[in-house]
Amino acid sequence: MKAGIPTEYLKKKIGFLNCKIDLSKKTFIPRIETEYWVRKAIKEIKKELKDKNKKIKVLDVFAGSGCIGIAILKSIGNSLVDFNDIDKRAIAQIKTNLKLNEISSKRYRVHKSSFFERLKGRRYDFIFANPPYIAKQRVKEVESSVLKYEPNIALFSGKKGIYHIKRFLKEAKNFLKKNGIIYLEFDPDQKEEIKHILKKNKYQHFRFFKDQFRKHRWVKIIYKTQKT
Ligand SMILES: C[S@@+](CC[C@H](N)C(=O)[O-])C[C@H]1O[C@@H](n2cnc3c(N)ncnc32)[C@H](O)[C@@H]1O
């Protein structure tokens, strides 16, 4: 069977929460599982924000189209977001989408780097991460249109799909403020290994959540540097 071009790439723009997302640079197509947990995370952050005027600093580290960070900027008025991605197509796409959603340039920065390379010295209240997490050894299970049209760099993460998550978790705590929070998406099969990686890296407070299809899909991690 011939793989057809994903309809999302044929549309002028798609919706992601309250945002318009252009995918003309053929970056990763935002998934409804991501939309599901990002909605919950935003709701939670807004609810728990004690000082409504305090600026909150957010990093969208594997930003792709920029959908996660832009949803945060549109939903949380006092948020400032740094976007990061390794792929130049994504960098261009993020900038287009920021303009499309009329976000003030005072509220964001866009960085092109691998992991945290260009973010040295920065500290965030929240880090949002939807990294590549498909195992190369499971390539045959991936839909042919995804393989053919979506960027490979957005999909695969080493033989077992865990390379990015492992490296991300090792480095992320150096970029969090005290009691900073990470929201991380993963493949349901990776839950136990992630638990192990979290413990190894001395993250003590975390909770796993399921997506709308009842599959473990995201973890919330609070990095407490001291006992409180
Ligand atoms: C699964 S996509 C997620 C995109 C978007 N956040 C979303 O949820 O739709 C992963 C993104 O990570 C980027 N990426 C891959 N390796 C990276 C690295 N080493 N450092 C930074 N970004 C990377 C890819 O270019 C891709 O845009």
Image (cartoon, rainbow, N blue to C red):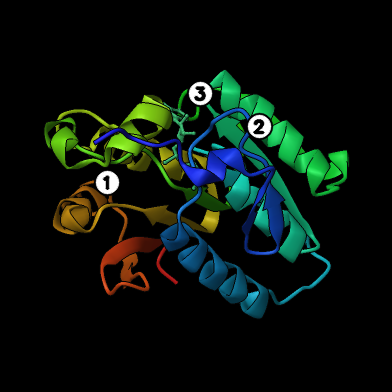
The foreground one among 105 and 80 is 105
User: What crowding class fits label 2: few (fewer than 14 Cα within 10 Å), some (14-19), or many (20 or more)?
Assistant: many
Callout count: 3
Q: Are marks 3 and 2 in contact (CB under 8 Å)?
A: no
Query: Which residue position holds label 3?
Result: 86
What is the CA distance from the residue labelled 1 to the residue labelled 2?
A: 33 Å
Disc 1 secondary structure class: loop
The foreground one among 219 and 200 is 219
* Kind of residue at badge 2: Gln
What is the CA distance from the residue labelled 1 to the residue labelled 3?
A: 24 Å
Residue at the far left: name it: 137
Q: Quadrant of residue 205?
A: bottom left
* Kind of residue at badge 1: Asn
- The picture places residue 199, in percent across and down from the top left corner, at 22, 54
* Kind of residue at badge 3: Ile
Residue occupying image coordinates x 52% and y 72%: 40
Residue at the far bottom: name it: 47
Quarter of the image that includes the C terminus: bottom left
Determine if the C-beta at disc 3 is less than 8 A from ligand 1: yes
Query: Which residue position holds label 1?
Result: 201
Q: Is residue 115 above or below residue 173?
A: above
In this rendering, position of residue 214 left or right of residue 177? left
- The picture places residue 189, in percent across and down from the top left corner, at 16, 55
The label number, if any, that marks residue 103 in the structure image: none
The foreground one among 4 and 167 is 4
The foreground one among 19 and 121 is 19
What is the CA distance from the residue labelled 3 to the residue labelled 2?
A: 12 Å
- The picture places residue 65, in percent across and down from the top left corner, at 59, 39
Disc 3 secondary structure class: loop
In this rendering, position of residue 166 left or right of residue 149? left
